[in-house]
Image (cartoon, rainbow, N blue to C red):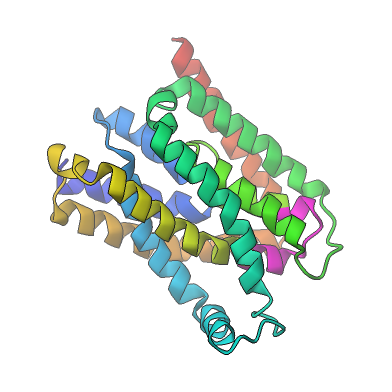
Amino acid sequence: MDPIQALILGFIQGVTEWLPISSTGHLRITEQLLGFTLPLLFDVTLHVGTLTVILFFFREDIKTVLFALAKGAFKSENGKLIPLIIVGSVPTALIGVGFTFTNTIETVFNSYLPIAGAFITCGVVLYLSKTGREQNENITYLAALAIGTAQGIALIPGISRSGLTIATALLLGVERKKAFKFSFLLSVPAVIGALGSTLYVQHETLTLLGVGWTEILIGISASMVVSYFALKLLWRVLAGEKFYLFAFYCWLIGAILLALSLC
């Protein structure tokens, strides 16, 4: 991998990570178009840049959550999120560990056909989210469990993490702003956990494939800058109740990949 390829992958990661169109799916497609395949570790490494954006974007919420955790103030508004994040992280971790140690993603989703199916499925869920009605002021433990499960499933290339988690929350009647915030706060332990577990399993593969610190830093920097603007765009779309429109993009990509797989 050269710095230009790292820049391209970082840019794509930044654009697609927070928009509900699957960053891992686009990275896999790009890798195939550029003629090389990288291990899951590099994909996860790019999340360091987008994670930095989340920590900055939600810095006030994260600060109050940490203060509530330190003081044991679990009845405050953000303090109530702590047990919900823990509950949501459990299914994410279980699914993630299963995918990592069985190498399912690397072996199954390495061609256009399965990724096409994932994009089409993601589009269906995104479109159905328009039927959700904002009924629940607070996120329940059952909702947190469902959203966390959705986050784990979204490790599949072609399934968007932000798309599936927010759509699940909307379908369960969660208010849009709360769905947006919880989705991204829930992503923080997930990304950290994914980076740690994948690093443990695949720590030698980056060196073996000639990926150095220069390429890693370029990819992370590109993803960080671009993802900030993508996150702001997502909130505008979600607040404007146009979230479901991303379904058509997912269907288009899915159809193109399906056609390519049949050629």
User: In the image, is 160 to the left or to the right of 51?
Assistant: right
In front of the other: 69 or 146: 69
Q: Is residue 187 visible?
A: yes
Q: Quadrant of the N terminus?
A: top left
Residue 256's x, y, as percent?
50, 24
Provide the residue span drawn in magenta: 169-181
Tell me the residue at 77%/61% (across/down). 174
Residue 148 versus residue 60 in the image, above or below: above
In front of the other: 126 or 165: 165
Residue 205's x, y, as percent?
20, 40
User: In the image, is 106 to the left or to the right of 150?
Assistant: left
Q: Main secondary structure of the magenta part?
A: helix
Tell me the residue at 78%/48% (across/down). 130
In front of the other: 15 or 121: 121
Q: Quadrant of the C terminus?
A: top left
User: In the image, is 167 to the left or to the right of 10?
Assistant: right
Residue 127 versus residue 234 in the image, above or below: above
Residue 174 among those drawn in magenta: yes
Residue 201 among those drawn in magenta: no
User: In the image, is 61 to the left or to the right of 244?
Assistant: left
Where on the picture, by quarter, is residue 166? Answer: bottom right
Residue 249's x, y, as percent?
58, 38
Residue 94's x, y, as percent?
53, 46
Where on the picture, by quarter, is residue 182? Answer: bottom right
Q: Is residue 242 visible?
A: no
